[in-house]
Image (cartoon, rainbow, N blue to C red):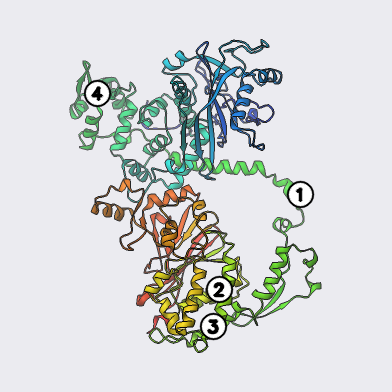
Amino acid sequence: MHGAMHSTKDKKESTATNHHTIYRLKPLDQLTNLNNNNNNNNCDNKHDNNESTTTSSSSIIPYDCYVFVIYCPLHEKLAITRQTDRQIVWLPFTRTISIIDNDYRFTDQAINGVLTILSDNNAERLKLLCKTLPFQQCHCMQIFRIQSPQTSKFAIRLTYFVELSRSTTNDNNKFICCQDSEHIKWIAICELLNNNYIPNLWGPELIQFCRQSRKKPIAQQIRELSLEKAYFFLPRDTARNLEESILKSAHLTDKDVERLYQDFIEHCFPSTYQTFESFRCYMSKYGFDRNDCRLNSLFNAFNFQNNGFLSFHELLLGLATIEPDTVHGEWRVRFIFRYYNNNGTGNLDMNEFQRMIIDLNQGLSLSIESINLKIRESLHEIGTKLVNNKCVITCDDFVQAIGSHRFRGTSSLCRSSKSLFELLSRTVSAKALKKSDRFFNMDAIIDQFKGICFNCKTKQYFLANHSIKLNRNGLIVQSKMLEQQQLFSINQQQMKPYELAALNYSKEIQFNFESSVSNLLITLIRQFNPDKGTNRKPKGLLENDPELLWKLVNVLCNDMERLLDHEDKCVRIQSPCYVIGDIHGNLDDLLQMEQVLWKRLPCMGSNFLFLGDYVDRGQWSIECCLYLMSFKILCPNKVTLLRGNHEVRSLQTYYTYKNECLRKYGKIYGEYIWESTNKVFDKLPISATIDASIFCSHGGIPKTAQTLNEINQIKRKLVDPEKESISAWEILWSDPCHNQQFVEMCNFFGIDHQETNGYLSNMKRGTAYQFNEFAATRFLHKNGLRRMIRAHEVPQMGYQFHFNGKCLTIFSCSHYCGNQNHCALILIDQQILRIIRLDTYDNNDSKS
């Protein structure tokens, strides 16, 4: 036998995939059938020997279920699933039904499930058992939640301890305890606890629950396998520990970890661990023969906790260790030691070491004398100890000998000839393709839509209410309401109230270029821009008629507040979407964006998300603010304005926005305008998601709110976010911090970085936090997100990546405070993030 991991797929062009089946009881009444089409998805796998032939499973997506520990105190026995050539041994379980009647409790479902099991799915027997319950208690002993990486939703596994009544029969003399049936077998508890190996055992919960039930009273446990726990070890730029360095050296990605976790929970369900039986079924899916004697050694090597079953992290690290390109370091050396230490003593005896030497020299055809000579030479280099009158090699001596290069050649041991993670990726893709073929009969679809495009057949189109006229610059200069007979798709008498309101909104606001305040202000700002002055001598919009501007601002802000009253604190947006960072009163850059991105407003095909900081620093903050509010009102479903840390009164008083309003429009009207715009800022949302995949905010993620639901619970109006909502304040002010810098800062302040949960006080801001990759990854995974986009900082090129691209900073104000930084923004479309930089060299805001 060789130490290198060569799968049987290297020797055969095709290998049939094996399947296992955990028996699921067919339900009665409200219990749902758990075994649909089971016969079509399983095949027997017979071997020449008499070994048990448990077969591996096609993946099962975890669902809510009940698990039953059914105990007979009279005979000291426990019910388990009956072993046949197509089943495995575990506890009986049934699917949880959705509760329609509020009076129908979870315990009622559990009782129904127990009776279904004890009646062996016999309807008549079930009715008799319902009259006199054959058990004296049905107690929930564990609640276990399993989170899916695809949906971030939890499947709940409820485990009930059921103690049968001590009488062997009920009044109708129909129920006799401890009788094996077609699906259930009874096993003595002493046999269960004393045997080290139970054939075909699928998960360790059978033994664990059995031991737990022996302790009275039975304590209730609440546990979970969440994404946060599953993704504790990830391949990072700067590894935090030996485990993460292995993942990094194996060239794995976060997506590899996610795919393996999904595959793991689907394979193990309803268990959350792998026994040896489950492990060899799993490895058979990826090319290993189930009878390969190396699998037992691999299982021991994977199981570094030495408890007889594998957790997800043990499987992940084990597979990463045997990858072809994984760096040969201390972790792999200890893995190899466990691989050859089959007796589990923690020391290599001479027979085990001889097997290692043979594997190291497998291609040399050495004689027995030559092998013995190499063993003696190697033992001399490594060193031995006498334990229980036996000469053995300890693990520490083995690691030290390889680390000091006294014992060489072990890097070739315990390696797969091909990447199992690549195979897993292809398997997942093939599974998705097969699923799509199963659910979509393309021949039927083609026949149904024959003669017309599929997309056109399924969509409904409506004629817009207005025709528009564009000038040479692409701006809308005229709109015309279509006549009633032309609107063949619109019948106002049949329109719903919200549809009629939308029609009136388009007539009175969006396409009303004569009296709509929003259109009027945008036109005035465009006309004002060429003569707005310079940074040293700036002018103001309508500064000679502040009363008129105040009236326009008052109408505009009232309209904005009404719109914002219906927006969440975390807004959901769909692509295509442009994401734009800080503006800071840079009117030239803002109007240049209009020219290249949305000059035909309000007729636009994309969404636009602004990340805040519209005011302060620049000389035309009020003009930028009024333009963006008008933009929002003209395109309420296309434009989203988030709040930045400068949309707060205290900061504007310290910087320039308040003084700008007072300087341009005097103390009275300047104060009115400043306060009116801030009332709008008070209601702005603080975050957004794009395609339910990308988190967007001005600063970063909050420490005190870990879910989007918690963010949406923040009250709509925040006059002083620092005092009214610490979570909102953290979102506005926090910054990402690269791992190495984070660790150095922790060391400087004498803080253990592993105890920070990824957050450290933001010293450069004097408020909120800096967060590292661990905190960002945990927040994203907990909310089913992939990336985050934020602003708040000034990269030289206008953009900057953090955490291997998980986090992206964008800044859209060029020449900020006299610097030479660029203006950049992001287009998100068709699952691609494209960075766009604008040429703003000639903009007036860059001139003095």
Please tell me how crowded label 2 is: few (under 14), some (14-19), or many (20+) other residues with Cα within 10 Å: many
Q: Amino acid at mark 4?
A: Ser
Q: Earlier in the sequence, mark 1 or mark 2?
A: 1
Q: Quadrant of residue 402?
A: top left
- Binning the other alpha carbons within 10 Å of mark 4 as few (below 14), some (14 to 19) or many (20 upward) gives few
Residue 149, above or below 127? below
Q: Is residue 376 left or right of residue 216?
A: left
Q: Is residue 757 left or right of residue 380?
A: right
Seen in the picture, residue 501 relative to 1 is either above or below; the reply is below
Q: Confirm or deny contact between disc 1 and disc 4 (CB under 8 A).
A: no
Q: Point out the image quarter for the N terminus.
A: top left
Report helix, strand or loop for mark 2.
Answer: helix
Single out the mark in the foreground, 1 or 4: 1
Give the Cα distance between marks 3 and 1.
62 Å
Closer to the chain start, of discs 3 and 2, is 3
Q: Which residue is mark 2?
A: 557
Task: Inspect the image, locate mark 3, and give the three-letter code of the amino acid beneath it.
Answer: Leu
Q: Secondary structure at mark 1?
A: helix
Q: Which residue is mark 4?
A: 370
Direction bottom: furthest residue: 544
Q: CA distance from mark 1 to mark 4?
A: 73 Å
Q: Amino acid at mark 1?
A: Asp
Q: Nearer the viewer, residue 230 or 236?
A: 230
User: Which-is-in-front pick, marks 4 and 3?
Assistant: 3
Residue beneath the point at 75% across and 75% down: 482
Mark 2 is on which residue type?
Answer: Cys
> Residue 511: percent from the left, percent from the top?
66, 76
Residue at far right of view: 485
Give the residue pinned by disc 3.
549
Residues 131 and 821: in front is 131
Return the residue at label 1: 447
* Mark closer to the chain start, 4 or 3: 4
